[in-house]
Image: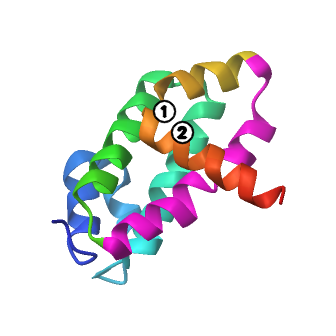
Amino acid sequence: MLSQYEVTPFIAAKMPQIKSSLIHAGLSLTAYQAIQVLTDYTKQKALEHDFHAVQKCMSLVEKLYDKGNTLVRNAVENIFIYSFSTMMSRCNVVEWRIVQSYMPSELYSLYVQQVLKSKC
């Protein structure tokens, strides 16, 4: 089980290109803040059409969700999954379909559930 205290080092080890964004004033970010950094990076890469990086991010988030404790899973759901709607609005149809193809099925199912709940 991955605790909230392990999220920042876990992401930094897998994504060294955002390591500096994960450290603020010499302190590791909270799980929610770290997931937000990863979310922002994923959105940026989608808009830059760096779909290989998007795929890597999706895979990392899937691992966080699968291995994470309840707090980590909630952070993924409330930050990363929630961001899919804003990502979709910034991408054209083709870009969105490509991004969607890299979404692990469990994360996409969570996104669909969120969308359906918001329409009720």
Q: Position of residue 81 (x, y in %)?
A: 56, 52
Q: Which residues are magenta?
A: 70-93
Residue shown at 80% from the left, 40% from the top = 89
Question: What label sits on residue 108 in the rendered view?
Answer: 2
Q: Nearer the viewer, mark 1 or mark 2?
A: 2
Identify which residue, 91 or 24, lies in the foreground.
91
Q: Are marks 1 and 2 in contact (CB under 8 Å)?
A: yes
Between 30 and 80, the one nearer to me in the picture = 80
Residue lying at the far top of the rendered structure: 94
Helix, strand or loop under label 1 = loop
Q: Residue at x 73, y 37 (%)?
A: 88
Furthest toward the right, the residue is 119
Can you say whether 7 is above or below 24 in the image?
Answer: above
The image quadrant that residue 4 belongs to is bottom left
Tell me which residue sits at (72%, 50%) in the image: 115
| Most common SS among magenta residues | helix
Amino acid found under the numbered disc labelled 1: Met
In-image side of 30 versus 86 (left or right): left
- How far across and how far down the image is residue 120, in percent? 83, 60
Q: Is residue 23 visible?
A: no
Which class describes the residues within 10 Å of circle 2: few (<14), some (14-19), or many (20+)? some
Task: Quarter of the image for the N terminus: give it.
Answer: bottom left
| Residue 92 colored in magenta in the image | yes
Whether the magenta-drawn stretch holds residue 91 is answered as yes
Q: Quadrant of residue 68?
A: bottom left
Q: CA gap, disc 1 to disc 2?
A: 6 Å
User: Horizontal and vertical percent for residue 75?
Assistant: 45, 68
Q: Is residue 40 rendered to the left or right of residue 60? A: right
Q: Which mark is residue 103?
A: 1
In this rendering, is residue 4 above or below 7? below
**Of marks 1 and 2, which one's residue comes earlier in the chain?**
1
